[in-house]
Amino acid sequence: TKLSHQKGFHETHVYVVDLLRRLKEILGEYRQASPKSKPCGIGRKEDAT
């Protein structure tokens, strides 16, 4: 049971990493498409400080 659990966890980890990678790519393309206009909610903390 231990091996199967670790395998499942590993698959989930790979899936999450792949999702994050796609998100970063999408965000990167979006920033390149519109560098000046920021979507509300993102980067607000940076502007506040």
Image (cartoon, rainbow, N blue to C red):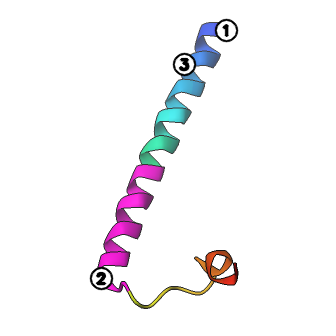
Q: Is disc 1 surrounded by few (<14), some (14 to 19) or many (20+) residues within 10 Å?
A: few
Q: Specify whether residue 26 is painted magenta.
A: yes
**Residue 17's spot in the image, x, y percent?**
47, 42
Against 13, is 26 above or below?
below
Q: 19 or 35, which lies in front? A: 35
Circle 1: residue type: Lys
Q: Residue at x 68, y 76 (%)?
A: 45
Q: Secondary structure at mark 1?
A: helix
- Residue assigned mark 1: 2
**Residue 12's spot in the image, x, y percent?**
55, 34
The image's mark for residue 7 is: 3
- Residue assigned mark 2: 33
Q: Secondary structure at mark 3?
A: helix
Q: Residue at x 64, y 18 (%)?
A: 5
Q: 18 or 31, which lies in front? A: 31
Are dots 1 and 2 in contact, CB under 8 Å? no
Q: Residue at x 36, y 67 (%)?
A: 28
User: Magenta region's main secondary structure?
Assistant: helix
**Residue 21's spot in the image, x, y percent?**
40, 51
Q: Looking at the figure, which quarter contains the N terminus?
A: top right
The tag earlier along the polypeptide, 3 or 1, is 1
Circle 3: residue type: Lys
Circle 2: residue type: Ala
In this picture, which residue range is highlighted in magenta? 20-35
